[in-house]
């Protein structure tokens, strides 16, 4: 999978509210109300990530889940990162 250009990344980010670029990754934080909600949200990410064979980096801090995406094998951002970001957003309509 090819790395995306800066203009391609900007265009894809414009379609994903709340996601931000930080160097060679995209990041978004999700509030889930409490620790249980945060853990359940993380659990909901397993199926789409496994189906794609593409796994996010995750941080849980009580009611917040920080999701970081990058294609490590390519050393940056690819279409897979944005596809998974869209799938994650669909699991969290109130994000």
Image (tube, grey):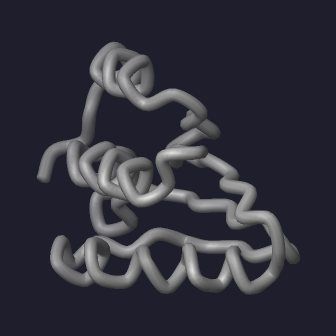
- Using the image, determine if residue 81 lies above or below residue 7: below
> Horizontally, is 30 left or right of 91 in the view?
right
Percent across and percent down for residue 6 are 38, 21
Percent across and percent down for residue 86 are 33, 46
> Horizontally, is 79 left or right of 25 in the view?
left
Which quarter of the rendered picture does the C terminus lie within? top right
- Using the image, determine if residue 6 lies above or below residue 56: above
* Residue 38 image-quadrant placement: bottom right
> Horizontally, is 8 left or right of 42 in the view?
left
Q: Residue at x 30, y 68 (%)?
A: 73
Q: Residue at x 46, y 69 (%)?
A: 56
| Residue lying furthest right | 62
- Using the image, determine if residue 4 lies above or below residue 10: below
Percent across and percent down for residue 43 are 49, 85
* Residue 34 image-quadrant placement: bottom right
Q: Nearer the viewer, residue 76 or 93?
A: 93
Percent across and percent down for residue 89 are 43, 49
Q: Nearer the viewer, residue 94 or 80?
A: 94
| Residue lying furthest left | 1
Question: Looking at the image, how many numbered discs can be counted on the residues?
Answer: 0
Q: Residue at x 58, y 45 (%)?
A: 94
Q: Residue at x 71, y 64 (%)?
A: 32
């Amino acid at each position: 999978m090819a790395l995306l250009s800066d203009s391609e990344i900007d265009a894809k980010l414009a379609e994903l509210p709340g996601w931000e670029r930080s160097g060679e990754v995209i990041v978004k934080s999700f509030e889930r109300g409490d620790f249980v909600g945060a853990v359940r949200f993380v659990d909901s990410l397993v199926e789409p990530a496994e189906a794609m064979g593409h796994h996010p980096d995750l941080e849980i801090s009580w009611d917040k889940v920080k999701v970081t995406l990058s294609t490590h094998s390519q050393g940056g951002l690819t279409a897979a990162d944005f596809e998974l970001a869209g799938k994650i957003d669909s699991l969290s309509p109130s994000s």
